[in-house]
Amino acid sequence: MWQRIGNLIGKEFIQIRRDRLLIAFLILAPVLQLSLLAQATSQGVRERPLAVLDLDHSAFSRRLVAALENTETLAVCCAPASQREVQSLLDRGQAELALVIPAGFADRLLDGDAPAQVQFIADGSNNVAAFAALSAAEGAVARFARDLAAGYGVSSSSSPVDLRVIIRYNPTLNSRHYTIPAQVGFIVYQVTLAVAAVSLAREREMGTLEQLIIAPLRRPEIIIGKAAAPMLVGCLDFAFMLAIAILVFEVPMRGSLLLLAALTVLFVIAETAWGLMISTVARTQQQAVLFVFVQAMLDMTFSGYLVPVDNLPLLLRAVSNLVPMRHYLTVIRSIMLKAATAQVLWPHILALAALGLALSTLAALNVSRRLD
């Protein structure tokens, strides 16, 4: 009995050894995934974009800004001219934290009669980044106050700076509000990709691909027929998962449901096209599922699902723009939590549309070539 089992195990390893594509995925993909995650997570939360609205323009206000810049967590990205511009930067995700220094800040510090107020406005849609940014900002303000007390003889019994904090979009920094929309997007991605990837591989494995080729169907009709099922499954899965996120887990839906649904269709089209390309390469359904698994690991790294895209090296950050899920996760989080509009999300909308068109064209050409 043991000899027969040993022979079967040997046969399995021989088959794996003969499948060079499978061996490449088994060795190179895990190494690449581990390297990317290690690179992205080793940097922690660093250089989060800080907008500074300085209405005082004094030496003290500049010194406070310098104290914030000296932290590793924060990096001044822009200097808005008004509160409206601050709100726009937070809506677009160009800034995750904003500092507002009111006029007369230096005079109140020197008078010492009452603490000088400053205000931080945080983007709470990413609770991890918001908590880290606020912690770093509060620490920098505390050091600024201590240095002020030591250098200018200000009483240290109470802080000369009154720090006010406002958290937008997720006031309680509830982690569910950040993670669950991303999970909805990832589930839609995974289901759509898997269903599309096994479509032609299943026909090839069952021996029905030749029957499909000789059927009275034109090539575009076959491609549309193969793409329709995963697209429909992906859209239905999105509706079901979104309902659970809103009704069960109480994630707010502040933006336009119609806009989110339309952009989800763009995302599903792109992932369906990518799945069909995988299906033309895979010889069996098992191999197609393996490809989807590896692809999902890579896209999780490039999309910002696990760690912020900003943590990636510059080259990989540029590559992430070619990953549809990166744009879709920004879209679903922004619409649900920030009530973002198409005017705010237009770069991601254009990216999804361009990627969907490019991937659909490549998939159509690839499938047609495989069917000929």
Image (cartoon, helix red, strand yellow):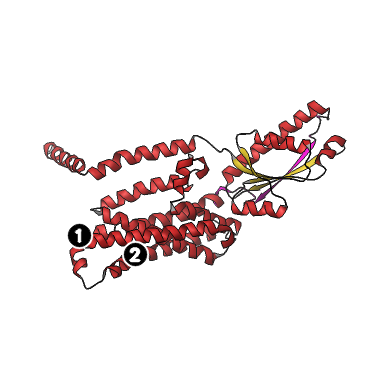
Q: Residue at x 65, y 36 (%)?
A: 69
Residue 131 located left or right of residue 244: right
| Quarter residue 107 falls in | top right
Q: Which mark is residue 206?
A: 1
Percent across and percent down for residue 345 are 55, 58
Question: Mark 1 or 2 closer to N-term?
Answer: 1
Q: Is residue 369 above or below residue 74?
A: below
Residue 171 located left or right of residue 267: right
Residue 2 located left or right of residue 269: left
Q: Residue at x 75, y 28 (%)?
A: 147
Looking at the image, can residue 4 be seen? yes
**Callout 2 secondary element:** helix
Dot 1 amino acid type = Met
Q: Which residue lies furthest to the bottom in this view?
A: 216
Q: Residue 227 carries which label?
A: 2
Looking at the image, can residue 169 be seen? no
Q: Give the range drawn in magenta.
A: 156-176
Percent across and percent down for residue 41 are 48, 37
**Callout 1 secondary element:** helix
Residue closest to the eye, 205 or 242: 205
Q: Which residue lies furthest to the top in this view?
A: 150
Distance (Cα) linking label 1 and label 2: 19 Å
Q: Which mark is residue 73?
A: none
**For mark 2, does the 10 Å Cα neighbourhood hold few (<14), some (14 to 19), or many (20 or more) residues?**
many
Dot 2 amino acid type = Ala
Q: Residue at x 64, y 51 (%)?
A: 89
Q: Is residue 145 magenta?
A: no
Q: Residue at x 67, y 53 (%)?
A: 87
